[in-house]
Amino acid sequence: MANDVENLIRSTVEGVRPLYVAYTHAMWESATTGAAGASKKEQEAQAALMRFWADPERHALAKRLDAAGAARDPIEARQLRLIYLSAAKESARPGRPPSKWAPRWLSKCASWLG
C-alpha cells in the first residue's frame, strides 16, 4: 500500500506541474497584456487544471489511502492529505475556478521528490 501512496504522489506532481505552470504563465500574460487571446489561453489552462483535480479516480484513491493511514511517514502523510483535499475540493466545485491554495503544496512535493 505504501507503493500506492508513493505512486499517487509522484503521478499527481508529474501531472499537475505542467498544468499549473501553463495556468500561471497564461494568467500572468493575461494580466499584463490584456490581450483577448491571452484571456482565452488563461481560461483554457484553468479548465485543464480543474479537470485534472476533478478526476474522480484520483479523489477516490487518495481518500481510500488517506483513510487507511497508508503513508509511511509524516511528510508522505501530509502530501497524501493535500492531494485528497485538493481533489475533494475541486470535485465539489464544478464550473468554478480552481482554488488558489492547492498549487502551493506542489513546490513542496516537487522538492521532496527530488
Image (cartoon, grey):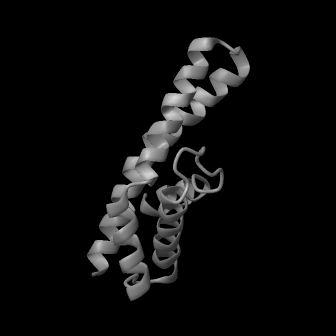
Query: Is residue 9 toward the left or the right of residue 1 in the image?
Result: right
Q: Is residue 15 above or below residue 67?
A: above
Residue located at (61% from left, 21% from top): 39
In depth, the one of 27 and 104 nearer the eye is 27
Residue at position x 55%, y 54% in the image: 93
Tell me if residue 108 comes above or below residue 1 in the rendering: above
The N terminus lies in quadrant: bottom left
| Residue 32 x %, y % | 72, 20
Q: Nearer the viewer, residue 19 or 36?
A: 36
Q: Is residue 60 above or below residue 22?
A: below
Q: Position of residue 87 (x, y in %)?
A: 47, 61
* Residue at 63% in and 30% down: 27
Q: How many marks?
A: 0
Residue 114 x/y as whole percent:
43, 57
Residue 81 at x, y percent in the picture? 51, 73
- Residue 8 relative to residue 104: left or right: left
